[in-house]
Image: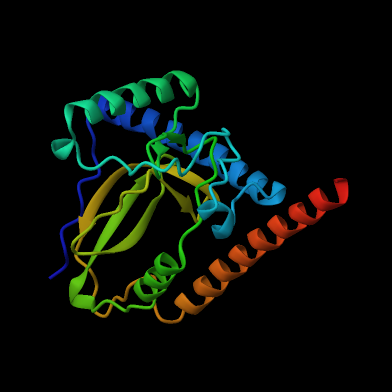
Amino acid sequence: MMPPTPDRSTPATKQSRAHREALAAEDLARRMASNRARWLDEGAYLSYDEFVAGAPCRGCGEPLLDGRPAFGPTNKMTDEELTERAEELARHKETHRSCGAGSWFVGRNEHCLLCCPMPPLSPGQISTIRTLLSRRAPASELVLWELHLRCGHFVEQTCHQTSRPMSATVSCPTCDEVRGVVSRSELPAPPGESLALSDQTAPVRNQLAEAESALIAARARVRALRDQLRK
């Protein structure tokens, strides 16, 4: 028995809003990709040694590690911490009002996803990610999703049954461009489907991560040598 055809109809108002949000997501994705390429070229990413030594963010100049513990869950914060958190969020929103991006933090200072290079992963985090990427999920745990893109094309994506596609943008193979996701529909997973991050792709991803880390460390060493020559 063939699975039912998914209903791809969307009310006009909801569809218009979804398309506007998808277009905004595309614009943000392009700006972030451009910044990531520039950061890599300019050596803006910190090495792990620089990070633990207390080097500031090379995007905004604010501290990454200020000696204070990060904020915990909101329901476990003290009144003083809630006030401090609210003040920090207000300061960040005012400073990055035109960015239209989210934020991240390691200590208590908020950093912009668009303006600030993310801090490096620790060796332990890299090891955990390597283990996760090398895992092959059984087909019985997978769910197939159909993503409706702003360009009108549809792409399929396989996720674990405990999650769903969350990315606001994906690469459209037909347009060969990054496109915003307008809607997502869950479909029956075909038998034998395997996780996209399989044992075959994991080694390549691991090598890429290690090569990028080595490149960042090498550029940090070049900057240090140049500073010595200037003295």
Camera-side residue: 51 or 151? 51
Quadrant of the image for the N terminus? Answer: bottom left
Camera-side residue: 188 or 125? 125
Q: Quadrant of residue 8?
A: top left
Q: Position of residue 230 (x, y in %)?
A: 86, 46
The residue sitting at 49% across, 79% down in the picture is: 203
How are the residues colored?
rainbow
In the picture provided, is 204 more to the left or to the right than 107? right
Residue 41 in the image: above or below residue 206: above
Q: Position of residue 156 (x, y in %)?
A: 34, 59
Q: Position of residue 145 (x, y in %)?
A: 27, 58
In the picture provided, is 44 more to the left or to the right than 230? left
In the picture provided, is 15 more to the left or to the right than 108? left
Q: Quadrant of residue 136?
A: bottom left
Camera-side residue: 33 or 71? 71
The residue sitting at 61% across, 63% down in the picture is: 212
Q: Quadrant of residue 2?
A: bottom left
